[in-house]
Amino acid sequence: MLDVRPALDAAAAPPVIRREDYQAPDWLVPEIALDFDLDPARTVVRARLSVTRNGDHDRPLRLDGEELELLSVRVDGEAREGRIEDGRLVVDIAGGGATVETEVAIAPEKNSQLMGLYASGGILCTQCEAEGFRRITFFPDRPDVLSRYRVRLTADKARYPVLLSNGNPIEEGDAGEGRHFAVWEDPFPKPSYLFAIVAGDLACNRDRFRTMTGRSVELGIWVREADLPKTAHAMQALKDAFAWDEEVYGREYDLDRFNIVAVSDFNFGAMENKGLNIFNTRYVLADAETASDADIDAVAAVVAHEYFHNWSGNRVTCRDWFQLSLKEGLTVFRDQGFSEDMGSKAVQRIDQVRTLRAAQFPEDAGPLAHPIRPDSYIEIANFYTATVYNKGAEVIRMLRTILGAERYRKGTDLYFNRHDGQAVTCEDFVRAMEDASGIDLQQFRLWYSQAGTPRVRARLEQANGRAALHLSQEVPATPGQPAKQPMVVPLRVALIGQTSGREIVGERLVLLRTGEQVEPFASVSEPAYLSINRGFSAPVIVEAERRSGEIEALAVSDTDSFARFEAGQELMTRDLMAAIDGAELDPSAVVAAVGATLRSNVLDAAFKADAIALPGENILIEKLDAADPARVHAVREAMRRAIGTRLKDDLSRAYMGASRADPDSLSGEAKGNRRLRGATLSLLAAGDPALGRSLAARQYEGARTMTDRQSALMVLAMLGGDEAVAALDDFYRRFESDPLVIDKWFAVQASVPGEATLDAVTRLAAHPAFTLANPNRLRALAGNFAGTPSAFHREDGRGYDWLAEMIVAADKLNPQTAARFVAPLGRWRKIEPGRAAKMRGALERILGEPGLSKDVFELASKSLG
Ligand code: B3K
Ligand code: ZN
């Protein structure tokens, strides 16, 4: 048995992989034939690789392998002794090419890492990105080795009636002794990380899509028979995504088949394997009774995301893993565009920025900060981050803003055409944009190399009918990058008349390029307010000097809906921070702004729901140097109470109005109303718990959708008492047989604010329905607990101990998923010294564990840093 991931001890720190050390592969593998004799206990994999020497060298062929039992090696038909060096199979080859055959055995049912070939609820499936293929067979497992695959699958016919792989099916038949076989061929050369197979007893939702050139593509969504009725949303989203990519990017699908398979045990959302996407059930199965509106939207976004990878990732792939944002940033930006076009642009943008602020800003400001194109890593699985994905998408968005939509599209056309079939770099992408547009992007490239969220200061000066916008920028130091250069920051700016409320200077794009810069505005007829970073045109922190009354005015009247939302958040943050710093809480300005929003006749319900919600506690903590999370929670709750009390009538009216919406509709309007219903209920409950309890109990009982049921359950759980216990029991019983809903049951209880939640999660971790082996369940419990500051940051530090124990226990089964929970402990720099010391203590204990994975080792050691 071969394992190239030795257990770590302090003396043997794992090697660091560096971007600057990249070297082209010594050997290429233009063709590979794979033959799987499938069995959950012992699967035999025979591989036939045609290899060719790449360049003038005399180095042997080295093949990656991990946890493989090597049975035999042959070169050009001749048996060889398997030679393992540094965890790789080394094969000496005399000439310029050879046929190398290996035979290995693997044990899918013992594979708890969920990387390589594994079993999930009776289905055999694979996950190869980034380095899982080496757990299936010996291969140069790196994205710049592209091969044409032919795959033969043989399995028990009764247990595994469906046999799938990438590409097109070319043969199937009986294999005797109750077994059958299928052969699949993928005509497109691809890197090993896009390889996939599935074997299982699956039912299929079938449909068709006619492409822009008239080809018919057979679409299939494969799930357990009982789940078939829940696949309609995913199928509609898939067809919408096919059409959108043709229309917006001119990209057509290239195979005759497109299959999606849903499995319950999955390390993340989904995977874009060529022609055979494999999904976490969470992003496929949805109906209004069991999935919230947010879940349903997420299904569509992830289906689209994985489909869009067919061009941004598969046809044009990454040269090495440092280039991950080449495919992920671009594909997130593409799926964001899809969601904006399918729903409300303004609301989508607010959601995108919320995610960025909640997940990426803290990363960029902490010990794990890295550029969207990292320079080094120990374990690549740790770099599927909000920075690479979400900030990566913001970088593409800025490129489109700077180039304009038309030139941006010319750029993507050039990129896809120039690099079709290649494994390329972020630099290749930027160069295509530059070549197609004629715009120099030299300085823009800093967005790829510099980490940290730039801070932009803005001050508007006005005199004699003119105005001048004084801007300055600073990029903070981050680990390994003490000094930074100024970036190109595209800021959409407008001036709003103080009395007229109109745009007295229409929106323009200001490119901040230097440390300090002044932007003049002529003929400014009346005193002006500054509307800046409209639509969140740059992923930066803007600190604008505000005149008295300015932010209050913009919060109700900015002509850009995103900027209006931002002004509201700025106002809330200002007054919350003042109280957190020790001043007496003055809720009057926030109450006035929330009241105006609720009473507005022009704003839609979804926007209202976003605009009346206070910034989250994590976002407030991020802005502090030594936060006391209990105080942050208390102040924020006091503000919510003030809103709930003083605006009881407005909130009740809005709640009732939103409740009249058609309960069965999934239109944008109906979804918006449900969102507003949840937001107003939560504030009403903060102001008047007895009223909140009765409204929530009624909403829970009458709920026709999961959205209504879940928001009511959360309010009841927060209020506690017998009603909460009864509703939680009812919820469990009602949905006992639906794992995705039971995840919500865990999530709701783990998200209740306050120190008592630790007892709840301790109890829940011992519940028979809890398992460390299922990533969704683990995320529901540990992820939500760690994301609830007043629960996680108990003063006695026991919240940290609990999470550390979870990480250590989960690491033994599934390092990739365990490592996802380390970051919350790494935020200690933002927390007051007493708790911070306890957070460090927890990290140290994790590092002291024998046999730690390199995934957890890398993040825990960097977090202490
Ligand atoms: N490319 C995959 C993510 C793989 C994560 C591997 N640790 C899904 C996606 O981003 O589309
Ligand atoms: Zn992706």
Image (tube, rainbow, N blue to C red):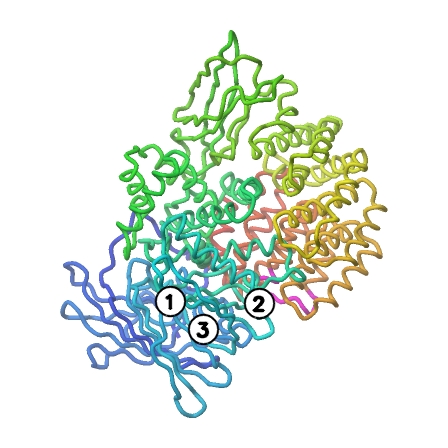
Mark 2–mark 3 Cα distance, whole angstroms, equals 20 Å
Kindly identify the amino acid type of the residue bearing the numbered disc 3.
Val
Mark 3 element type? strand
Residue 544 drawn in magenta? no
Question: Ligand 1: does it lie within 8 Å of the C-beta at label 1?
Answer: no
| Circles 2, 3 touching at the beta carbon (< 8 Å) | no
> Does the rendering let one see residue 795?
no
As drawn, the residue found furthest toward the top would be: 464
Give the mark count: 3
Q: Is residue 598 left or right of residue 376?
A: right
Picture coordinates of residue 305, whole percent (x, y):
46, 54
Earlier sequence position, callout 1 versus callout 2:
1
**Please, is residue 510 above or below residue 728 in the view?**
above
Q: Nearer the viewer, mark 1 or mark 2?
A: 1
Residue underneath mark 3: 198
Residue underneath mark 2: 773
Picture coordinates of residue 333, whole percent (x, y):
45, 46
Crowd rating for badge 3 (residues with CA inside 10 Å; few <14, some 14–19, many 20+): many
Picture coordinates of residue 300, whole percent (x, y):
53, 56
- Where's ligand 1: which quadrant? bottom left
Earlier sequence position, callout 2 versus callout 3:
3
Kindly identify the amino acid type of the residue bearing the numbered disc 1.
Phe
Question: Ligand 1: does it lie within 8 Å of the C-beta at label 3?
Answer: no
Residue 771 drawn in magenta? yes
Magenta part of the protein: which range? 766-778
Residues 504 and 28: in front is: 504
Mark 3–mark 1 Cα distance, whole angstroms, equals 11 Å
Crowd rating for badge 1 (residues with CA inside 10 Å; few <14, some 14–19, many 20+): many
Residue underneath mark 1: 195
